[in-house]
Image (cartoon, helix red, strand yellow):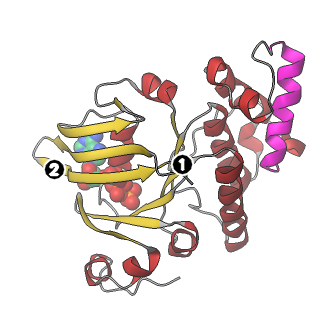
Amino acid sequence: MTNNLLLKVENVGIQFGGLKAVQGLNLELFQGELIGLIGPNGAGKTTSFNMLTGVYKPTEGEILFDGKRTNNMSPHQVTKSGVSRTFQNIRLFKELSVLDNVKVANHSLAKHSIFSSVFRLPSFFSGEAKMEEVSIEFLKIFGLDKYKDELSKNLPYGMQRRLEIARALAAGPKLLLLDEPAAGMNPQETKDLMDLIALIRKRFDLTILLIEHDMGLVMGICERIYVLDHGQLIADGTPEEIRNNPKVIEAYLGEEVTE
Ligand SMILES: Nc1ncnc2c1ncn2[C@@H]1O[C@H](COP(=O)(O)OP(=O)(O)OP(=O)(O)O)[C@@H](O)[C@H]1O
């Protein structure tokens, strides 16, 4: 891990009518980090992702990604600059095959193809057959190659969640935002997902920001954790610090934050 600051969020806020959904948000993510963003329901986590990805424009503050101000960029521009995300509710091209879901994501950003960087292909790499071969190699990393011709809507739930991550990665991001990737998964699927996240971070040299309600997952893999409550940051620190932070425990309605 290097010490390059990849994302800096300074005093960011957004207001919907009278509601300050997020205010005074400060985040710093360094290249290669795996960071958690947690908080009770309605705390402002997804709204923060929406601001980081250009879906919502902050009403205050600055978002700097890779040295560029992204506040007013469109979602497409933000993706192009190197930020990809998954959604709380799975958003795949349901009527397309697993393979095509990944190919579509890669096509949209051919210049920054993660396929060419990861598989060390020459820059002139092109052609449908080659694309197909490389896409299958890519699916193997996610354990999805055996489903390549299935319509994505027919995949088992846990596999759909994996495909969401594969699709986000195929766009070639530097920063990957995962919105509750373990939602609805059973303990074994969650464990496998943790291993997968650790693997892709290393393999693709990624920086990851993770929203997750599964405390075992967050505490188990994140180096640092930010905690939001009622739109405001109430704590940040290592999993150990967060677990023992009285404000965090109180925010979770007195429930002990356990692994
Ligand atoms: N487009 C919008 N218009 C009005 N209010 C909104 C909008 N988007 C989000 N909010 C409000 O902002 C607050 C934060 O919501 P957000 O979805 O970010 O919370 P969250 O931390 O992701 O919650 P959860 O864990 O339940 O997904 C909520 O009160 C929500 O109703």
Q: Is residue 95 visible?
A: no
Q: Residue 226, position in %: x, y?
A: 36, 63
Report whether 242 appears left or right of 123. Answer: left
Task: Please give the name of the residue rendered at 35% of the width and 66% of the height, measured from the top-left corner.
Answer: 39
From the image, tell me which residue sits under label 1: 207
Residue drawn at the location 79% of the way across and 32% of the way down: 99
Quadrant assignment, res 257: bottom left
Residue 170, which numbered label? none
Circle 2 is placed at which residue position? 20
Quadrant placement of the N terminus = bottom right
Principal secondary structure, stretch drawn in magenta: helix
Amino acid type, mark 2: Lys
Q: Position of residue 63 (x, y in %)?
A: 30, 38
Amino acid type of the residue tagged 1 in the rendering: Thr
Give, as a single range, the part of the protein colored magenta: 126-143
The single residue placed furthest to the left in the displayed view is 18
Identify the residue at horizontal 46%, vertical 23% (top origin). Answer: 76
Find out whether residue 137 is within the magenta segment: yes
* Residue 185, image x, y percentages: 64, 64
Residue that appears at 24% across and 38% down: 62
- State if disc 2 and disc 1 touch (CB < 8 Å): no
Label 2 environment density (alpha carbons within 10 Å; few <14, some 14–19, many ≥20): some
